[in-house]
Image (cartoon, helix red, strand yellow):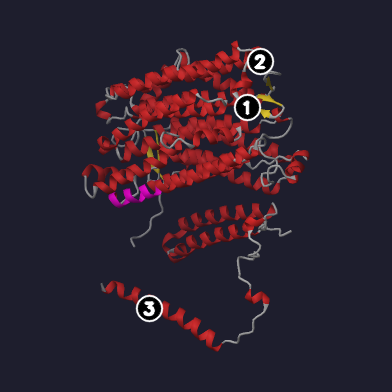
Amino acid sequence: MELYTPILALMVLALGFAVFSVVVSSLTGPARYNRAKLDSYECGIEPTPQAHGGGRIPVKYYTVAMTFIIFDVEIMFLVPWAIYFDELALFGFLAMLLFLVNITIAYVYEFKRGGLDWD
Amino acid sequence: MTGFQAPNVEWLTLSPLLVVFLAAVVGVLVEAFVPRAQRYAVQVGLSLAAMVGTLVASLVVFARLSPTADEAELGRVVAAGAVAADGPAVFTWVLLSVLGLLSVMLFAERKVESGVLTFAGQAAALPGTEAEREASTRGLSHTEVFPLMLFAIGGMMLFPASNDLLTMFVALEVLSLPLYLLCGLARRRRLLSQEAAMKYFLLGAFSSGFFVYGLALVYGYAGSMGFAQIAAAVSADTGSRALLLGGIGLMSVGLLFKVGAAPFHAWTPDVYQGAPTAVTAFMAAATKVAAFGAMLRLFYVAFGGNRDDWLPMVWAVAILTMVVGSVLAISQTDVKRMLAYSSIAHAGFLLTGFLGIRSLDEVAPGGLTGVSAVLFYLTTYGFTTMAAFAVVSIVRDAGGETTHLARWQGLGKESPLVAGVFAFLLLAMAGIPLTSGFTGKWAVFAAATAAGAWPVVVVAVLMSAVAAYFYVRVIVLMFFAEPVGDGPSVAVPSALTTVVIAVGTLVTLVLGIVPGALIELLGNVGVFIR
């Protein structure tokens, strides 16, 4: 059971931090609202009018989002590799290099074919 | 953590896979850097070179297959236990290289669409919009299909060779994702094509989910991803059997979906109909080879020890698949849907051969194992079906391919040669002697009967008779019915499609007359490494 004590402590700490931040910022922060601030934030997209009412979504945003996810996943692999870098030695280095090159090729393709051009 | 030691990858043995994946990655770079005007030539050249290269590499690996330490099997386990390059795996590599080569040719066909690929000019343009019309008037043609196809081929080659659950899952996804995309890229009837892609993607993703869930349960049972370790755990019969059986059941869902076996066949007609015909041909032939190869390895190597638990399930699925495929094909009015149901029925026949799986010591020397029989059937089926879909792609009218059977009436008068070839391929699918369909069926039925699965074989023979009805119906339609209206017309394809049809038909004929050499070869190499 005592194995779970640190996890429990972390949960309490996280909860405490969340409650503390919200409460303190609402008590001490200045409240100067303007229109942009009051608008709900939805990934750079106007939340109204709703898409099903004929409102259209700028689809170009999603290539950025997808690229972000790919790099996100890349980090997921890079961190454990970096931790064991000394043990994985040259083989690990080359394997990771291969992975990075492949990801970069996909990125180069997207870039060259205008996937990141906004207009 | 114990010290890490770099695994011995054995690059040479893996070279067939590496060639394909390297070519696919280079293909992506070609899309990025080569000017649009030259892309078609570069991509087709690259893809053809890659397929020839992987064919040569596969043949070299095949010729170099050497016995394992205990002389029981041919081949070796490479890449730290992740890939088994044994007889059946390398045979499927060779087979997939040839089918892939033919598929590249079908993909590259431009003559029937008067100078552009049969794939969507601008896939991102919505069907029926100004953007689509503009793409069509400008004669746009995108060549991403070639690297996509190469990635799919690479995944297919890895799938039957994967020797642990994780590699198998990665291979499954690598082969599936490009296929989902390719299905939605038809130039004509784009809504149908996009609907097919959507259905295939949603159902495919769902079945992959089943597969992963089963994978997790099997891992929980055996404590290892490796097939050899799972087999050891199964023989030792340690751990909870509920976990094992649940895992086998869920993984079967994922694999049976890929081969298009009932009751997981519902996607097949829609996807085969909607996808561009070149993609349908590729999918029907190559995916089935890869998925059955993987299924054989998983069940034979990893779960071979508790055969009695899952054999009844395969009995039921085989019978159901044959009945569903053959009976529903009768009422089809679209030639692509009919061939789709026919491919479901073929999956049932392949599962019948699957029942011939026995432990090696039960097989008389030189006896036909289930593995050899299924591999032989896959060879015959792959070439026949690819040629059949290639024929479908050249029977056209002003609106593109005419797949409605009513429009095929009187094709024999319009073009006796094309109709004759198609009739021959249909007869092969029906299993008429002197075609490879007959020898293939004979092989799987013999293997299944020898393993005591005669009730399934009885159903299989009955269903072959039912299937013969709808194949012959199409032949009668083509030769003995008067054309309606303008009648069908046959586009004269370039040499590419012609070669595919010719090779498919020739292999169908040759394997029907002299199957002995290939069966003997498969008898020697059709043993999985364990």
Local secondary structure at mark 2: loop
Same chain assignment for discs 1 and 2: yes
What predominant SS class does the magenta segment belong to? helix
Please indicate whether residue A3 sits to the left or right of residue B251 in the image: left
Q: Is residue B328 above or below residue B227?
A: above
Numbered tag placed on residue A12 in the rendering: 3
Q: Is residue A103 above or below residue B192?
A: below
1 vs 2, front mark: 2
Identify the magenta region: B211-221
Image point (32%, 38%), residue name: B301
Q: Mark 1 sits on what residue?
A: B393
Front residue of this view, candidates B77 and B232? B232
Mark linked to residue B209:
none
Please state the horizontal and vertical placement of residue B321, each as a whole percent of the image: 40, 30
The foreground one among B513 and A40 is: A40
Q: Image point 53% across, 16% down: which residue? A: B473
Q: Image height check: is B387 above or below A8?
A: above
**Looking at the image, which residue sits at the far top?**
B480
- The residue singled out by tag 2 in the image is B483
Q: Residues within 10 Å of mark 1 (few under 14, many from 20)?
A: many
The location of residue B512, given as percent across then percent down, is: 46, 16
Distance of label 3 from label 1 (alpha carbons): 65 Å
Q: Position of residue B259 (x, y in %)?
A: 44, 35
Q: Is residue B382 left or right of residue B357?
A: right
Q: Please check the rendered image and state whether residue B443 is part of the magenta-colored stretch, yes or no.
A: no
